[in-house]
Each structure stands twice: as structure tokens, then as C-alpha cells.
Amino acid sequence: MIGLILLLFVIGSVIFIHQVLSSFCSTKIFSNKISKALFYLSALFGTPIHELSHAFVAVIFGHKIQAIKFFQAGADGRLGYVKHQWNTRSVYQSVGVFFIALAPLFTAFLFIHLLLNNLAFPIQSFVLQIDVATLQTISFAVLDYFWNTSTQIVRYSLNSLENTMWLVLISLLCFHCIPSRTDFGNALKGSVIVILLLSILWGVSYLFNLHHQQWMLAMFNWSVNMSSLIAIVSLLSMFWWLILTLPSIAFRA
């Protein structure tokens, strides 16, 4: 439960920062031909992955896809979209709304993990020591892990040009895989059912002693690991707003 709340908080914070930077930078980017061209060029890489993630998870949860656009440069500002229908009476399909909305971030997380494994990146997973777990120690442990992982990723990425290029590529993917405000709103709606189901599972496992502590701890550890990697690379991806804005400052095209 705490892990899900932590994950939603991190995602919500990332989206908020992304939207603030967007409001400041978008006008400059789209008022300059070079910046605008670079933005759409970057979107050609990230947007299809973003929309394909939505569509793939929608199919898994039995949603009916009505229309899909992997990339467009429309006047409405949308770079792509997936329109889908679902049976609101179906618990399974309603739970799917949560995962469909956040699918692009999960995809980015998967790419990050595959990349780290491919580069043999020496990063350790977060493991909470349950024997010393209090609210204070948990908070410090999570913050310490986030800080150490951040510095590890930056230092390792600066070890070679290849590592730096991979970090740039992943940050660009995250830049276009950050959920929109609409996506996050759908995720919040779906999270109500997810939290309800988790509460029921929590109660059943607690009452019948079905490895309650073990699976709750495993879920929390997974949430911290996922939240940390997503937050780190997503925050690094925010520099793309600066990069895309620079031509509008340097050139009057």
C-alpha cells in the first residue's frame, strides 16, 4: 500500500515538474523553426513507443482499441493518441485503466533495466531491513538509496562516451514517456480499484498468515526500486527542455 502511494507520488511529482517546464519552454520552442524541428525529431523516437505502450497494455486488459495514432504534428498539440473502450462493470478491465495510463513509464523502466544489465552496471537493488523498520529509518533508507543511485548513474555514465550516449538516449525516451495530465488522472481513477484490491489481499493474508510480511515487503522494495530509477532518469530528461529551448535563444529562425 505504502509502495503504491510512493510510486504515485513520484510519478505525480515528475509530471508536475514536466508540466511546469513545458509551460515555460513550449512557447519558445514552437516559435523557433530550429527548436520546433528538433522537438518533432525527438518525438519521432519517443512518441511511437509511448503510444505503443498504451495500446499493448490496453489489449492485455481486454480493452477495445478504437483508434491509434503513433505520431502526428497536429494543431491540438497532441503528438499521438490511443482511443479505447472498456466494460466499466469488469473489475479486470477497470484495474487495467491504472496500468494503461502508466504504461509508457513502465516501458521506460524496462528499457532502463535492460540497458543497465547490458552495460553490466553495478547498481544494487533496494532491500529494506525489516528488523530496524520505523517510519524514520524507512524514510532515511529510501532517501539514501535514491541519492546513492543517482550519483552512481551519473558517475558511471561519465566513465565513457558510450555510457554517456546511452544515458542521453534513455533520458530522451523518458522525456517522451512521461504520462500526460490526462494519463495521470486516469491512473488515479484506476488506482482506487487497485488500492481496494490490495487492501482485500492485505487483509486476507494478514488474517490467514499467508506470508503477509514477505510479500508486502517485496512489493515495497519493488516500488522503491522502480520509483527511484524512474525519478532519476525522468528528472535527467528534463534537461531536454533546456536543450530544445537553446536554439530559440541562440538563433532567431
Image (cartoon, rainbow, N blue to C red):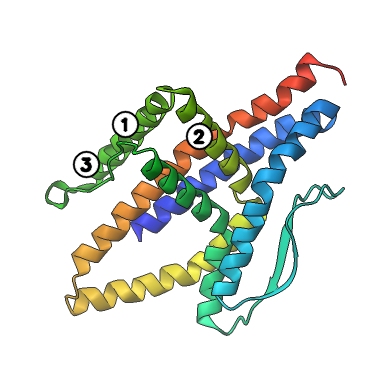
Q: Position of residue 13 (x, y in %)?
A: 52, 43
Determine crowd level at label 2: few under 14, some 14-19, many 20+ residues with C-alpha closer than 10 A: some
Marks 1 and 3, Cα distance to the nearest angstrom? 16 Å
User: Mark 1 is on which residue type?
Assistant: Asn
Q: Position of residue 180 (x, y in %)?
A: 65, 51
The answer to whether residue 72 is left or right of residue 167 is: right
| Tag in front: 2 or 3 | 2
**Can I make out residue 31 in this image?**
yes
In the depicted structure, whether residue 136 falls above or below residue 8:
above
Question: What mark, if any, has residue 166 been given in the picture?
Answer: 2
In the depicted structure, whether residue 101 falls above or below residue 38:
below
Residue in the image at 24% along x and 41% along y? 136
Q: Position of residue 90 (x, y in %)?
A: 55, 83
Residue in the image at 16% along x and 52% along y? 130
Q: Which secondary structure, mark 1?
A: helix
Location of the N terminus by quadrant is bottom left
Marks 2 and 1, Cα distance to the nearest angstrom? 20 Å
Residue placed under numbered mark 3 in the picture: 137
Q: How many marks?
A: 3
Residue placed under numbered mark 1 in the picture: 148
User: Mark 3 is on which residue type?
Assistant: Thr
